[in-house]
Image (spheres, rainbow, N blue to C red):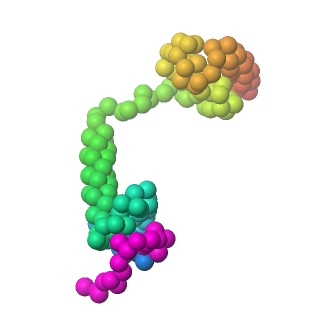
Amino acid sequence: MRERRGATWHAPGARFDDFYASEYRDVVGLAYVLSGSWWVAEDLAQEAFLAAHRNWDRIAAYEQPEAWVRRVAANLAVSAFRRRAAEAKALARVALRQEPMVTELSEDDAEFWRAVRSLPRRQAQAVSLYYLEDRSIAEVAEILDMAQGTVKKHLHDGRRSLARRLKSEDDAT
């Protein structure tokens, strides 16, 4: 154990900047040993210090504000660990599924969807939602946050482009 610096952060007029500069490295170290990742540790420390900053007038009056920020970081680390564990379990369940998550495409279908991906972004989105998911014009408009007339225009332009591209590919074979 190393000796604590003995700073008294609860003194009137204590500055958050000084508190942060003095305690940050140690809080990141704590978060690292709890999380096992420097990236996660830095994020956890930043979240803990952000919470301290938001409430600095109250936190500065505590006898040991450095203990408070460490408790917050430790609680965040536990939450992050639980979240990662839940995500890992969910991924394992998905991996164990017998059926593929996406239906296999025939060669003709694959060619069509390659052509769709080559369309401008909004046309490709409109065509995909309309044809792959069998969405109505109104539903596509809501999902893409655009007017129904705009969806119709993207579908029209997309169909024309697809017809030209797929016809030219048929002519080439």
For image coordinates 67% across by 13% down, the residue present is 149
Say above or below: 143 vs 59.
Answer: above
Q: In the visual, does 165 lie left or right of 59? A: right
**Residue closest to the eye, 26 or 12:** 12
Which residue is at a point 42% across and 27% down the rendered structure image?
A: 103
State the image coordinates of residue 170 (x, y, percent, origin top left).
69, 22
Please name whichever residue, 94 or 5, is drawn nearer the observer in this view of the structure: 5
Q: Which of 157 and 85 is in front in this view?
A: 85
Q: 139 or 92, which is in the foreground?
A: 139
Residue 79 visible to an observer of this rendering: yes
On-image quarter of the C terminus: top right
Can I make out residue 171 in this image? no
| Residue 139 picture location, percent across and down | 52, 16
Would you identify the image quadrant in which residue 2 lies?
bottom left
Instruction: Read off the magenta span.
Output: 1-19
Task: Classify residue 134 as left or right of residue 160.
Answer: left
Quadrant showing the N terminus: bottom left
- Position of 1 relative to 13 (above/below): below
Residue furthest out toward the bottom: 3
Q: Is residue 117 left or right of residue 8?
A: right
Residue 150 sits in quarter: top right
**How many numbered circles are shown?**
0
* Residue at 41 percent of width and 68 percent of height: 38
Q: Does the magenta stretch include residue 145?
A: no
The kind of secondary structure the magenta stretch mainly shows is: loop
Q: Residue furthest front?
A: 12
What percent of the width, then of the height, locates residue 160? 72, 17
Q: Which residue is drawn at 63% across and 21% down?
A: 146
Q: In this view, does 75 lie above or below 170?
A: below
Quarter holding residue 162:
top right
Question: Where residue 122 sits: x, y (%)?
Answer: 65, 28
